[in-house]
Image (cartoon, rainbow, N blue to C red):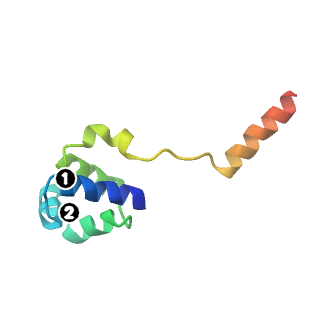
């Protein structure tokens, strides 16, 4: 979430907006913007509202970092390889 927060902050600053302006235009509190930019308590709804305000809602898929395979998925994959050998 910290990386998402960094990206949100960069988008806001690129548009030369204060946290208060972003909050007002997004319909959230300034504290919510602050927390989201620090990777804390950012709900999907908050993310969508901020991205819409920054004109970046269409890039939502690119905005979210790729997830790594979970340890359980790695184990399942390796078990399948062993079974097929």
Q: Nearer the viewer, residue 65 or 52?
A: 65
Number of the front mark, 2 or 1 = 1
Q: In the figure, is residue 77 to the left or right of 43? A: right
Q: In the figure, is residue 58 to the left or right of 43? A: left
* Above or below, comparing residue 5 to residue 74 in the picture: below
Q: Residues within 10 Å of mark 2 (few under 14, many from 20)?
A: some
Quick one: SS at disc 1?
Answer: helix
Q: Which mark is residue 74?
A: none
Report the label total. Answer: 2
Tell me where residue 77 sits by quadrant. Answer: top right
> What residue is disc 1 on?
14
Q: Quadrant of the N terminus?
A: bottom left
Residue 31, percent from left and from top = 24, 71
Q: Residues within 10 Å of mark 1 (few under 14, many from 20)?
A: few
> What residue is disc 2 on?
28
First along the sequence among labels 2 and 1: 1
* Above or below, comparing residue 72 to residue 6 in the picture: above
Quick one: SS at disc 2?
Answer: loop
Q: Name the residue rendered at 84%, 28% in the picture.
A: 84
In the displayed orientation, state which residue is furthest to the bottom.
31
Q: Quadrant of the C terminus?
A: top right
Q: Name the residue rendered at 68%, 51% in the picture.
A: 71
In the displayed orientation, state which residue is furthest to the top.
84
Q: Name the residue rendered at 27%, 59% in the picture.
A: 9
Q: In the figure, is residue 79 to the left or right of 65? A: right
Residue 74, percent from left and from top = 71, 44
For the residues marked 2 and 1, what is the alpha-carbon distance in whole angstroms? Answer: 20 Å
């Amino acid at each position: 979430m910290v990386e998402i927060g960094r990206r949100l902050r960069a988008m806001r600053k690129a548009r030369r907006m204060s946290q208060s302006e972003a909050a007002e235009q997004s319909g959230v509190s300034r504290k919510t913007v602050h927390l989201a930019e620090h990777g804390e308590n950012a709900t999907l709804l908050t993310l969508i509202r901020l991205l819409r305000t920054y004109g970046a809602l269409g890039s939502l898929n690119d905005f979210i970092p790729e997830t790594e395979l979970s340890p359980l998925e790695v184990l399942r994959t390796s078990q399948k390889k062993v079974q097929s050998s």
